[in-house]
Every structure is written in C-alpha cells, then in structure tokens.
Amino acid sequence: MTLQDLSRAASAIAHAFHGAHVHIDVGYAVAVTGLSLLIAFAVVGLGIVLYRAFRAAINMTPAKFALALFITAWVLILLGSLIP
C-alpha cells in the first residue's frame, strides 16, 4: 500500500463524516495522531499530579496548606499575565 492509497482511504473516511470531499494528507493525519497522543499523555499526567496533590493536602498542617494556596495563587497570577 502506498502513501497515495493511504491518503485516498483517509479522504474516503473524511468524506463519510463531512459529506464533502476533503483531501487529508498522510503527514497531516500522522501529525494529528501524534498531537492527540501528546494531549492524552498530558491529561493523564495532570490527573496523576492532581491526585498526588490532593493526597498530600490531606496530610498538611493548616500553615503548610495556606502556604500552598499562596504559592498556587502566585503561579496562577503569573500564568494569567503571561498568557493573553
């Protein structure tokens, strides 16, 4: 199977979903697949980090919890100022 055949197959699948002829390059499909995998890894990683943070917050003293909230607030303020 050549890359052109793969491109035709991807176009046929896209045509079935969109109802119009859409030409999808194989490189584009591979790039979208790779980005989807990276996003999935990021979401799973974020879930693990949030779970561990929640477990750590249960064992914190009130002073450590307040410090963690203070640091989180500053990080969010900095991110909000950097990202338009």
Image (cartoon, rainbow, N blue to C red):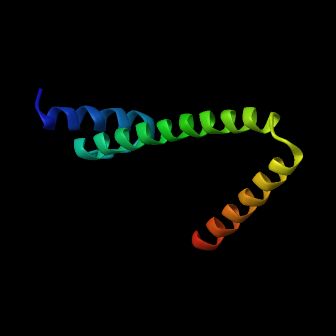
Left or right position of 7 against 35: left
Residue 30 position within the rendered picture, expressed as x and y whole percent measured from the top left = 29, 40
The x and y percentages for residue 79 are 62, 65
Query: Which x, y percent locates residue 6?
Result: 20, 33
- Judged left or right of residue 3, residue 83 is right
Q: How many marks?
A: 0
Outermost residue toward the left in this view = 2
Q: Residue furthest right?
A: 62
Residue occupying image coordinates x 68% and y 33%: 51
Q: In which quarter of the image is residue 1?
A: top left
Q: Nearer the viewer, residue 41 or 34?
A: 41
Can you tell which quarter of the image residue 17 is in?
top left
Residue that appears at 62% across and 38% down = 49
Q: Residue at x 29, y 47 (%)?
A: 28
The x and y percentages for residue 78 are 64, 69
Residue 83 in the figure: left or right of residue 10: right
Residue pictured at 23% horizontal, 45% vertical: 27
- The image quadrant where one finds the C terminus is bottom right
Say whether residue 32 is left or right of residue 44. left
Q: Which of 75 and 81 is in front in this view?
A: 75
